[in-house]
Image (spheres, rainbow, N blue to C red):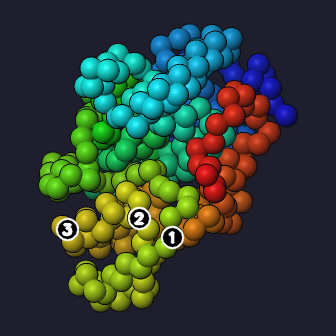
């Protein structure tokens, strides 16, 4: 087991990100070094997001305070409120970003997802790079998208994160702009509202699309791509579930068939990718297939297995809780 004290370095978050952006760093050949860098990046980003020094004791004290507040807010029944515009909860930090924050601090799963996104080179490099992170939360995956673009030495980069939680947007913007400057834009918006998705896609035609807001226990429904008139020849069907990822995909298909054809041709990268079988949702058995792990389908609660040798932050959180 690698203890936190042993694998967390004094190198700055910015320097860790710079090294990960180096195209000479082979994510497969230099697997051990990459894994260390990824875990350092995740933990140091947590510190940045919470505005505390990247010191283990400081991070743990801040986490204890954060989760104490989250439990208090949940006890008051305010957890479901997603903005602080309600005067009854104005200023209550935890009530508006608890869910994405809990996802962030499951560092093993976050590390696996982060590495998968940052190491993906399956997208076109022609022209400008536009990365979209739908349901960006703390925006750490937006950082991973930017790394993927920088690894391909693209000069014109803009990563856009969209989230409905007002304070999460504010916190994420403040954190990520310190690393990426004007290469990132974090905006508040509800992509499920009519016209919002269309507007975002038109303004920021994506090169890389991430939407990790997926469910672990929704029953599979069928989306027959033939019936949408988008393509003439493909798998007869893919699974469609009642979750934002596939809802956004379906809306995009109907709005912009050429976008979806680019996905099929792998000119646009997507995470998770229900089209190319990276993500297969099924009741209580949703799986991801990650290059960062065994390459075999993994139940969602096993996604972080590649980082099992790394000591976690002892906050007992899981990015996905199967069977909850």
Nearer to me, 19 or 79: 79
Q: Earlier in the sequence, mark 3 or mark 1?
A: 1
Residue to which mark 2 is pinned: 242
Nearer to me, 94 or 19: 94
For label 2, count other residues whose C-alpha is less than 10 Å away and answer few (under 14), some (14-19) or many (20+): some
Q: Is residue 318 left or right of residue 137?
A: right
The span from disc 2 to disc 1 (Cα, nearest Å) is: 8 Å
Residue to which mark 1 is pinned: 219
Nearer to me, 48 or 23: 48
Callout 1 secondary element: loop
Where residue 233 appears, x then y in whole percent? Answer: 35, 89
Callout 2 secondary element: loop
Q: Earlier in the sequence, mark 2 or mark 3?
A: 2
The span from disc 2 to disc 3 (Cα, nearest Å) is: 21 Å
Residue to which mark 3 is pinned: 256
Residue at (17%, 56%) from the top-left corner? 194
**Based on the displayed image, in which of its 4 quarters is residue 142 positioned?**
top left
Front: mark 3 or 1: 1
Q: Residue furthest front?
A: 76
Q: Is residue 38 above or below residue 5?
A: below
Confirm or deny contact between disc 2 and disc 3 (CB under 8 A).
no
Q: Earlier in the sequence, mark 2 or mark 1?
A: 1
**Based on the displayed image, in which of its 4 quarters is residue 300 positioned?**
bottom right
Callout 3 secondary element: loop
């Amino acid at each position: 087991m690698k203890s936190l004290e042993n694998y967390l370095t004094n190198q700055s978050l910015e320097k860790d990100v710079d090294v990960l952006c180096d195209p000479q760093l082979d994510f497969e050949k230099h697997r051990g070094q990459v894994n260390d860098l990824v875990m350092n990046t995740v933990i140091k980003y947590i510190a940045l997001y919470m505005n505390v020094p990247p010191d283990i004791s400081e991070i743990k004290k801040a986490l204890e305070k954060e989760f104490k507040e989250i439990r208090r807010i949940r006890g008051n029944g305010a957890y479901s409120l997603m903005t602080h515009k309600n005067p009854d909860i104005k200023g209550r930090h935890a009530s508006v970003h608890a869910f994405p924050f809990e996802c962030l601090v499951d560092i093993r799963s976050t590390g696996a997802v982060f590495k998968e996104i940052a190491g993906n080179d399956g997208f076109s490099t022609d022209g400008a790079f536009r990365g979209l992170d739908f349901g960006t939360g703390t925006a750490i995956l937006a950082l991973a998208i930017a790394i993927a673009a920088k690894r391909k030495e693209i000069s014109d980069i803009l990563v856009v994160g969209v989230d409905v939680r007002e304070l999460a947007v504010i916190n994420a913007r403040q954190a990520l702009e310190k690393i990426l400057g004007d290469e990132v834009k974090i905006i508040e918006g509800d992509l499920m509202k009519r016209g919002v998705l269309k507007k975002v896609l038109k303004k920021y035609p994506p090169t890389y699309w991430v939407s990790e807001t997926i469910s672990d226990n929704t029953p599979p429904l069928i989306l027959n791509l033939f019936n949408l008139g988008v393509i003439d020849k493909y798998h007869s069907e893919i699974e469609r579930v009642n979750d934002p990822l596939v809802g956004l995909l379906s809306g995009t298909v109907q709005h912009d068939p050429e976008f979806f054809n680019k996905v099929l041709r792998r000119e646009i990268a997507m995470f998770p990718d229900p089209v190319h079988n990276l993500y297969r949702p099924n009741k209580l058995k949703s799986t991801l297939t990650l290059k960062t792990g065994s390459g075999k389908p993994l139940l969602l609660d096993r996604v972080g297995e590649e980082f099992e040798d790394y000591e976690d932050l002892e906050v007992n959180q899981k990015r996905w809780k199967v069977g909850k």
